[in-house]
Image (spheres, grey):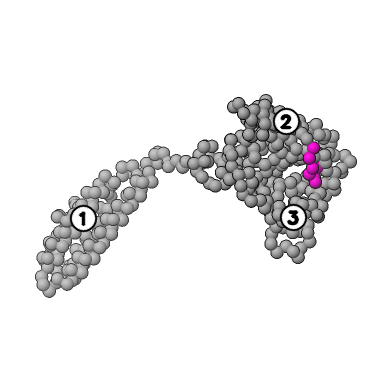
């Protein structure tokens, strides 16, 4: 039977306490059984101004009490007002939270309802490009290797055949960790300027044959502009085995460029210099914007500066001096290495004209790659 407010004839503290306890028990029982559809009716039943239970309590227990019991009855009614109000609001909040979470169906928990689907973001264009490059070389049998971004001078320079006075050691190019002056040069810490240290670490851990790809973040003391950033990404590769020649290097990179930019892309190599390779070369690909013609839309192609070629990466045969640092026998093995900037390739693939767009976090720009 639904609870109704009884009129009181006995206004003693004991009688008021008993009546209040009965009302509280009824409140708890009704709130536990209420459903979302009954929530408004439940609130009106207890708190409506005209005929709600709290209004009836005020009329029957406070106004109907004798003068000598007014104080005791008033305190008891105030306590009930606070209790009922707080409990009704808590019941509403509980029901609304359950409904918003998609957990309440009628007056039962429906576990068959679909859950809340979390939208997935798009892969960042730089990461997408790096993964695409890695996929090409993984299909050629290369394994992926990673290493620390904070390196020692030994791994970053010395083991790669950089002499102590090489310009790349200048602090204008390299970011050194402070407080390293008391250490020997080879033990000083710095932010790696390329991922080549990972190649050294890989060769120290593994004997030939070895084919490894080293993607990752690198740091240089460059001012940020449309084509430079103090933080960027590189992918470097290394292959060491018996009877590896420059022809293997050219064939590998030519295949990789065709996989990345299309089968019509051509490659060419011309002499360069890197301390850790000999001979060294820079590789160009035929311009993917003008198809190697140097002309586009009736005028000179700005991307290749009318040459029909775009410089893309550096490469070469591993210098035999490097093998001395990793305990390889330079008389029986040979190998090649190459390295490319991921952002540079992403700029070409997606037609981006400012490298800083990759780092600004502008959702409007990134949404184009979703």
The residue positioned 52% from the left and 37% from the top of the image is 368
Q: Which secondary structure lies at badge 1? A: helix
Q: In this view, does 138 lie to the left or right of 127?
A: right
The residue positioned 61% from the left and 47% from the top of the image is 225
150 relative to 104, above or below: below
Determine contact: label 2, label 3, CB under 8 Å: no
Q: Horizontal and vertical percent for residue 174? A: 71, 53
The image quadrant that residue 137 belongs to is top right
The image quadrant that residue 90 belongs to is bottom left
315 relative to 2, above or below: above
The residue positioned 21% from the left and 60% from the top of the image is 23
The disc placed on residue 267 is: 2
Classified by dominant secondary structure, the portion drawn in magenta counts as strand
How many angstroms separate mark 2 from mark 3 (CA)?
33 Å
Q: Which secondary structure lies at badge 2? A: strand
Of callouts 1 and 3, the N-terminal one: 1
Res 209 visible: no
Q: In this view, does 244 lie to the left or right of 85?
A: right
Per the image, the residue denoted by label 3 is 170
Give the magenta-colored segment's residue range. Answer: 271-277
Per the image, the residue denoted by label 1 is 46
Q: Is residue 262 left or right of residue 314?
A: left
How many angstroms separate mark 1 from mark 2 (CA)?
83 Å
242 relative to 195, above or below: above
Q: Horizontal and vertical percent for residue 155? A: 76, 52
In this view, the mark in front (1 or 2): 2
The disc placed on residue 157 is: none
Q: How crowded is mark 2: few (under 14 residues within 10 Å), some or many (20 or more)?
A: many
Of callouts 2 and 3, the N-terminal one: 3
Q: How crowded is mark 1: few (under 14 residues within 10 Å), some or many (20 or more)?
A: some
Q: Horizontal and vertical percent for residue 180? A: 72, 62
Question: Was residue 329 drawn as part of the magenta stretch in this picture?
Answer: no
């Amino acid at each position: 039977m639904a609870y109704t407010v009884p009129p009181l004839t006995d206004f003693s503290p004991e009688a008021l306490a008993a009546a209040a306890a009965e009302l509280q028990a009824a409140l708890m029982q009704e709130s536990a059984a209420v459903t979302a559809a009954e929530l408004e009716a439940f609130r009106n039943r207890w708190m409506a101004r005209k005929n709600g239970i709290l209004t009836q309590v005020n009329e029957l227990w406070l106004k109907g009490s004798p003068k000598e019991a007014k104080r005791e009855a008033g305190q008891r009614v105030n306590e009930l007002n606070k209790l009922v109000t707080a409990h009704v609001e808590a019941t509403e909040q509980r029901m609304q939270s359950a409904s918003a979470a998609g957990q309440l169906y009628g007056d039962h928990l429906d576990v068959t309802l679909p859950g809340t689907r979390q939208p997935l973001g798009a892969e960042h264009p730089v990461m997408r490009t790096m993964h695409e490059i890695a996929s090409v070389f993984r299909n050629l049998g290369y394994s992926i290797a990673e290493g620390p971004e904070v390196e020692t001078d030994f791994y970053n320079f010395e083991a790669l055949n950089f002499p102590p006075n090489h310009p790349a050691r200048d602090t204008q190019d390299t970011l050194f960790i402070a407080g390293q002056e008391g250490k020997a040069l080879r033990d000083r810490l710095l932010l790696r300027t390329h991922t080549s240290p990972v190649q050294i670490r890989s060769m120290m851990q593994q004997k030939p044959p070895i084919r490894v790809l080293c993607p990752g973040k690198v740091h240089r003391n460059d001012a940020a502009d449309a084509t430079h950033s103090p933080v960027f990404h590189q992918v470097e590769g290394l292959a060491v085995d018996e009877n590896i020649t420059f022809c293997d290097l050219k064939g590998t990179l030519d295949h990789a460029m065709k996989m990345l930019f299309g089968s019509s892309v051509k490659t060419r190599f011309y002499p360069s210099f890197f301390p850790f390779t000999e001979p060294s070369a820079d590789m160009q690909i035929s311009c993917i914007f003008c198809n190697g013609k140097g002309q586009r839309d009736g005028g000179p192609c700005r991307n290749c500066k009318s040459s029909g070629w775009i410089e893309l990466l550096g490469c070469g045969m591993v210098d035999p001096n490097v093998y001395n640092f990793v305990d390889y026998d330079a008389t029986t093995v040979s190998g090649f290495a190459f390295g490319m900037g991921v952002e540079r390739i992403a700029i070409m693939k997606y037609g981006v004209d400012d490298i800083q767009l990759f780092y600004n976090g502008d959702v409007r720009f990134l949404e184009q790659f979703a």
